[in-house]
Image: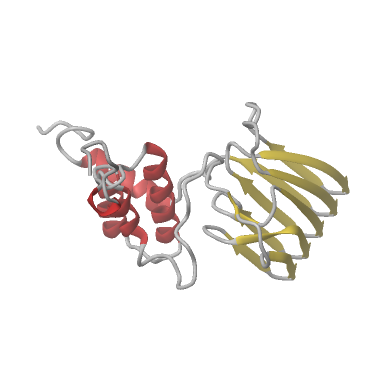
Amino acid sequence: MSDSAAEPPERRPALRASDADRERIVDVLRTAAGEGRLDVEELDERVSAAYTIRTLTELEALTHDLVPAGHAQPAATGQGGVVVRPGAGGAQRIISIMGGHERRGRWRVGRDLLVLSIMGGAELDFQHAEVTDQTTTIRVFTIMGGAELRFPPGVDVQVSKFALMGGQDVKLDEAPPPPGAPVFHVRLFSLMGGAEIRQGPKPKNWIERKLDQRRLDRPGPGGREPE
């Protein structure tokens, strides 16, 4: 065999992690901390490792014990973490009656999703969602209740709304989505209720703020200078 022959797969060097891969893994770690799967010390250690590890295999190992059985590791994408994976399944109804629902992290969304809140609320984060179609339609009804939907940058969010004795607050990225980005059609209807649509990362919770403060308190690069 000539020297120009392709190198066997088992002898090829491990794939290097990209900046997007690192941010994807850090988002998973922060979500896990918010869910109580990691404490502040563990979050600190793993986030620090995420920015120093070189290979993709080592990077993804940081979240192996945080992904429930039967769920795939989040795939790297150019659309803020949203993965389009055709097939059956996915949430089709989220109904809150005098109660509440919260969905975030990795979850699968059907092509048509109904969100109904009657004297209740729903907080839905699509930043790492898996959708079954390039176009997803979400109908949100809030009757004396509320709903908050958050989407990642880089997806196409199209909103239509109607409110009667209620209110709706929509704040989306000014930059146009890239060609071929997943599309979310969001239809809002509020009766003595409200809905909020946001695009981009959620403000840091107390765990993340505490972690940032710990880093500032450390001596050396990135922290306070020793006295």
Q: Position of residue 187 (x, y in %)?
A: 81, 48
Q: Position of residue 108 (x, y in %)?
A: 61, 61
Q: Position of residue 47 (x, y in %)?
A: 31, 49
Q: Is residue 167 above or below residue 88?
A: above
Picture residue at 77% right of the left edge, 45% below the top: 185
Q: Is residue 129 above or below residue 156?
A: below
Instruction: Indicate left or right for 148 with 25 as reference.
Output: right
Q: Residue 42: which quarter of the image? A: bottom left
Spot the residue most to the right: 164
Q: Nearer the viewer, residue 26 or 122?
A: 26
Spot the residue most to the top: 175
Q: Nearer the viewer, residue 97 or 112?
A: 112
Q: Nearer the viewer, residue 191 or 93?
A: 93
Picture residue at 37% right of the left edge, 37% below the top: 19
Spot the residue most to the bottom: 69
Instruction: Indicate left or right for 106 with 157 as reference.
Output: left
Q: Nearer the viewer, residue 113 or 132?
A: 132
Q: Is residue 179 above or below residue 152?
A: above
Instruction: Indicate left or right for 2 with 143 as reference.
Output: left
Spot the residue most to the front: 1
Q: Is residue 37 above or below residue 185?
A: below
Q: How is the image coloured?
A: secondary structure
Picture residue at 19% right of the left edge, 33% below the top: 224
Q: Position of residue 227 (x, y in %)?
A: 9, 32
